[in-house]
Image: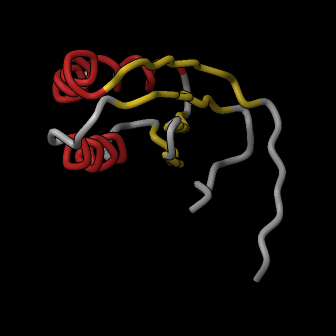
Amino acid sequence: MIAPTPTPPYYAVIFSSTRTEGDNGYAEMANLMVELASQQEGFLGVESARNELGITVSYWKDLDSIKKWRDQSEHTIARNKGRSDWYQSFKTRIAKVERDYGFERE
């Protein structure tokens, strides 16, 4: 599903990753992170897809909201577990969305 976002500007956190073998609790933690992120002030939405490469884009009101999410205690635990168990490699990028447009068939 495409996240419904407000009129720009807003921010996108783009998380690209390759996984290690096996689930090892990953799916459960990923679902929990989406649930917790959606409760954070400034959270606007999320989109995610995974094949060999996983890409999750979360949308945020401002940089302060992103920092607060980064520092959230359970998110910190998940990041550490990602480094030790779940990811072969990853990269996080933060971008300011200055314009968006789209189409939706009814």
Q: Residue 97 location in percent, x, y?
A: 72, 30
Residue 19 figure quarter: top left
Give the colour scheme shown: secondary structure
Tell me if 83 is positioned left or right of 67 in this view.
left
Q: Residue 23 location in percent, x, y?
A: 22, 43
The residue that appears at 45% across and 40% down in the rendered structure is 43
Q: Residue 99 location in percent, x, y?
A: 82, 37
Considering the image in quadrants, where does the N terminus appear? bottom right
> Extreme front residue here?
21
Q: Residue 53 location in percent, x, y?
A: 52, 35
The residue that appears at 54% across and 28% down in the rendered structure is 13
Q: In the image, is residue 86 above or below residue 45?
A: above
Total label count? Answer: 0
Q: In the image, is residue 99 above or below residue 47?
A: above
Tell me if 86 is positioned left or right of 56 in this view.
left
Residue 11 figure quarter: top right
Q: In the image, is residue 71 above or below residue 21?
A: above
Considering the image in quadrants, where does the C terminus appear? bottom right
Q: In the image, is residue 105 above or below residue 23?
A: below
